[in-house]
Image (spheres, rainbow, N blue to C red):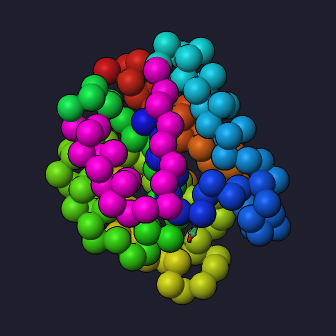
Amino acid sequence: LVINGPNLNTLGTREPEIYGATTLAEIEAGLVAQGAAAGLAVDTFQSNHEGAIIDRLHAARSDGTEFVIINPGAFTHTSIALRDAFQAAAVPFCEVHISNVYAREPFRHHSYLSDLAVGVMAGFGTRGYTLAMAFVVERLNRS
Ligand code: DQA
């Protein structure tokens, strides 16, 4: 399951000097194809609403989701509720940031999720999603 949080629906036009020119639809299609090539079904979900993302995580507890790749957007830095949802869902996840959040404003240096994540990608551009998916493919095909 690939989840993208607030404002990521505007990728492609949003601050392209930071986030690049690739749209979310292109990223999602690429990840679905990458998963399919490895025999994995990839579901995608984007919302600008904290509660909707939390509801999707609750559903992931019982819908067979084996792994979550999430770019939580700004909720990374604000959402204890999202943290609690990940703890409750008990589904392994990778956190992805397109930009290098550690090279940006101090408020982006803290994540409420990173210590729960299997791993974190930051600063590899939209390629970070692909690299995270390559990791998931390896991990799920090994287990
Ligand atoms: C982001 C980094 C966050 O700080 C920011 O709020 C985003 C995108 C990234 O992908 O680099 O919305 O998660």
- The answer to whether residue 19 is left or right of residue 31 is right
Residue 77 vs residue 80: left or right?
right
- Quadrant of residue 125 within the rendered picture: bottom right
Q: Which of 115 and 19 is in front in this view?
A: 19
Q: Does the image show residue 108?
A: yes
Q: Which residue is farthest left? A: 88
Q: In which quarter of the image is ligand 1?
A: bottom right
Of the 4 image quadrants, the one containing the C terminus is top left
Residue 57 x %, y %: 30, 46
Instruction: Please state the extent of the stretch shown in magenta in the rendering.
Output: 41-61
Residue 62 image point, x, y percent: 21, 32
Between residue 50 and residue 100, name the one nearer to us: 50
Taking the magenta stretch, the answer to whether it contains residue 42 is yes
Magenta span includes 71: no
Relative image position of residue 138 (x, y in whole percent): 47, 25
Identity of the residue drawn at 33% across and 60% down:
51
User: Which quarter of the rendered picture does the N terminus lie within?
Assistant: top left
Q: Nearer the viewer, residue 93 or 52?
A: 52
Is 41 on the left-hand or right-hand side of 53? Answer: right
Which residue shows up at 70% across the image and 56% down it?
A: 11
Q: Quadrant of residue 97?
A: bottom right
What residue appears at the point 54 percent right and 23 percent down from the top-left corner?
Answer: 35
